[in-house]
Image (cartoon, rainbow, N blue to C red):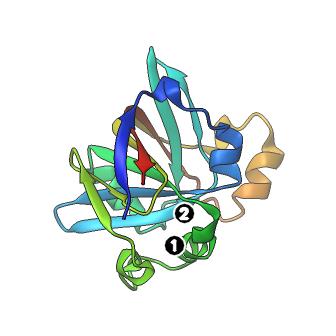
Amino acid sequence: MNGFQEISPLQLQENPFDLIGRQWALLTAADETGANTMTISWGGVGVLWGKQVVFAFVRPQRHTLPFMEHAGRFTLSFFDESYREKLSYCGTVSGRDEDKIAKCGFTVHQEDGAVCFHEARLALVCRKLYVQDLKEECFTDPKVALQNYAEKDYHRMFIGEIEKVLKAVD
């Protein structure tokens, strides 16, 4: 089980395109009933409103959505390649049907009311700042909407301020 060391977001040396788009992350939120997680490969990291932020996107049918709506904080947890199969599992099986966290053997780490995992090599603890649904009429390139939203199940965007960066230490 990893311990964590807190570092500044400015100390991150990761390529965000590789980190989110290729390595994937677990997006996790918790409420009074428990926690749910899902694998993401869409999102971003940047600066908005003078804050270091993440952008995370959740489709309306995902079980994680109500957790994200009710939670004040959420996390992005990043793992080494040996966890790829578990990340794939968390992206295909619904938390409505089973406890994915337990099934994968992840150890929950509580951090300021948010949940991440001891097995992660890196976790971003974020405070929710803004939520908005993507809308068909806002796409300036209709092909993007057609290619990604055949069912018109547009993602809900969450913008969160990165409050803590937790880096695994052995």
Spot the residue most to the left: 32
Q: Earlier in the sequence, mark 1 or mark 2?
A: 2
Amino acid type of the residue tagged 1 in the rendering = Cys
Could you say where residue 144 lies in the image, as x and y percent from the top left? 78, 47
Q: Residues within 10 Å of mark 2 (few under 14, many from 20)?
A: many
Q: CA distance from mark 1 to mark 2?
A: 6 Å
Image quadrant where one finds the C terminus: bottom left
Image point (46%, 77%), residue name: 94
Comparing 77 with 160, the one in front is: 77
| Residues at circles 1 and 2 in contact by the CB criterion of under 8 Å | yes
Name the residue beneath numbered marker 2: 39
Could you say where residue 16 lies in the image, as x and y percent from the top left? 64, 38
Image quadrant where one finds the N terminus: bottom left
Name the residue beneath numbered marker 1: 90
Comparing 82 with 84, the one in front is: 82
Could you say where residue 41 lies in the image, as x and y percent from the top left? 63, 55
Image point (48%, 67%), residue name: 61
- The reply, left or right, for residue 21 in relation to residue 76 is right
**145 to 59, vertically: above or below:** above
